[in-house]
Amino acid sequence: MTDDGPDDQPGPSRQRDVYMQGLADVTPDLPVRYEGLEAAALEALDDDAAGYVAGGAGGEETMTANREAFREWRIVPRMLRDVAERDRSVELLGRELSAPFLLAPIGVLSIVHADAETAVAEAAADLDLPMVLSTASSVRLEDVAATLDDAGGRGWFQLYWSSDRAITESMVERAEEADFEALVVTVDTPLLSWRERDIADAYLPFLDGEGIANYLSDPAFLDRLDADPAENELAAVREFVDIFGDPSLTWDDLAWLTDLTDLPVVVKGVLHPDDARAAMDSGADGVVVSNHGGRQVDRAIPALEALPDVVDRVGEDGAVLFDSGIRRGADALVALALGADAVLLGRPYVYGLALDGADGVRAVCENVLADFDLTLGLAGQRSAAGLDRSVLRKREG
Ligand SMILES: Cc1cc2nc3c(=O)[nH]c(=O)nc-3n(C[C@H](O)[C@H](O)[C@H](O)COP(=O)(O)O)c2cc1C
């Protein structure tokens, strides 16, 4: 239970700060509405970066469907249930989170802001939200871990499974040594999808040397090169492209990975309940129901539609996290009520980063947290962990 008094909880406290500033005619620096935030960020970014972040696979049907799926579920608020103090905390992988949010792994943030993952780490630590750091980060994992550590933050490491097993092993070892708390193994990206915006722009940020800091600092990766990357960056980039993914992986390989590490392993990118079961049977501690924000399989089912069946199939055996389409507090409440233990915030914080670095990430996350806190209370619910499907009604017809 939170120690905050009613007025110190994130919703009322954020409202108070904003409205008090309004008395001096000061309005928030960043657009508050998600639609305005996205538009302003895409305007601020160069065209290649904007297309990379905002874009999805193929005709972007799944990206659109991710949002539409939320419209299928409505909250049925309950009244007069003493919601003066709300407990937003949840337990995940045996540890408490002060709110049911993590920052999703997003690669190549140097194309969005010069402070990249360092800014995200600072903001995440300030807000006590775990940051899931991408393998494809622009800043070395050890440096991000140091930033998190200095600021009292928490980190999980997202693993892209290289076709060279020595590199995969090395990355896992480095993540362990840097004290990341969990591994998030992304399984929906053995290949990069057909992303029409990036193809039209003929743009892949990695080819510019962006987002490969963890590879250029990895002993197993450097072993593969004939020359120092500083002398021949193109050769290093080509090597990265060759070993980035492994389309030959199977669930047996996952069992190899869960045996390799003592860290909890969460499998990200699961949509079918049988895959969730296979993940658990291979020794995973949880799954992330996600379609990578519509960036991998166009016409894949919306992640929210996949969530209830996965929750039912995993049961009490592991954690179920959710992403792909979370924009506001009510979205998070719906995902939690459908059985997610926590949600990952993706593009919204990247747009905050684009507009104002660490302050932008902080502002966006604070708004989502405030909105969630208020929606929770106004729905007549006192506890994030206690949400269940009885809070929801499915749209009819
Ligand atoms: C620009 C961009 C880069 C991403 N990079 C990664 C990554 O490196 N690793 C990963 O597992 N997921 C990656 N994702 C997927 C996110 O972790 C998350 O699943 C997705 O953003 C959720 O969709 P939403 O942002 O539309 O809510 C990326 C997403 C975006 C938009």
Image (spheres, rainbow, N blue to C red):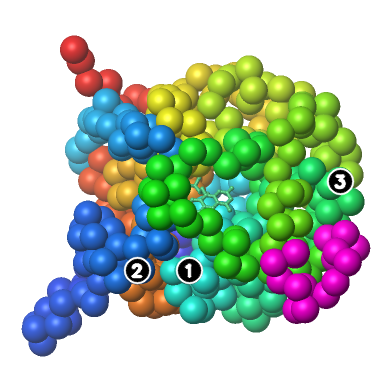
Look at 22% across and 21% down and name the residue there. Answer: 395
The amino acid marked with disc number 2 is Leu
Whole-percent x, y for residue 76 in the image: 23, 30
Look at 36% across and 37% down and name the residue there. Answer: 60
Q: Visible in this render: residue 196?
A: yes
In the picture of the structure, the residue carrying the numbered disc 1 is: 111
In the picture of the structure, the residue carrying the numbered disc 2 is: 45
Labels 2 and 1: the sequence-earlier one: 2
Q: Secondary structure at mark 2?
A: loop
> How far apart, in angstroms, are the residues tagged by discs 2 and 1?
8 Å
Q: In this image, 44 relative to 336: left or right? A: left
In the picture of the structure, the residue carrying the numbered disc 3 is: 165
Q: Secondary structure at mark 3?
A: helix
Q: Is residue 46 above or below residue 114?
A: above
Label ID, residue 187: none
Whole-percent x, y for residue 214 in the image: 72, 65
Determine the residue located farthest toward the bottom in the rendered image. 24
Labels 1 and 3: the sequence-earlier one: 1
Labels 2 and 3: the sequence-earlier one: 2
Q: Are marks 2 and 1 in contact (CB under 8 Å)?
A: yes
Look at 59% across and 46% down and name the residue there. Answer: 91
Which segment did they paint magenta?
A: 219-236
The amino acid marked with disc number 1 is Ile
The amino acid marked with disc number 3 is Arg
Look at 51% across and 66% down and name the residue there. Answer: 109
Residue 59 occupies which quadrant of the picture? top left
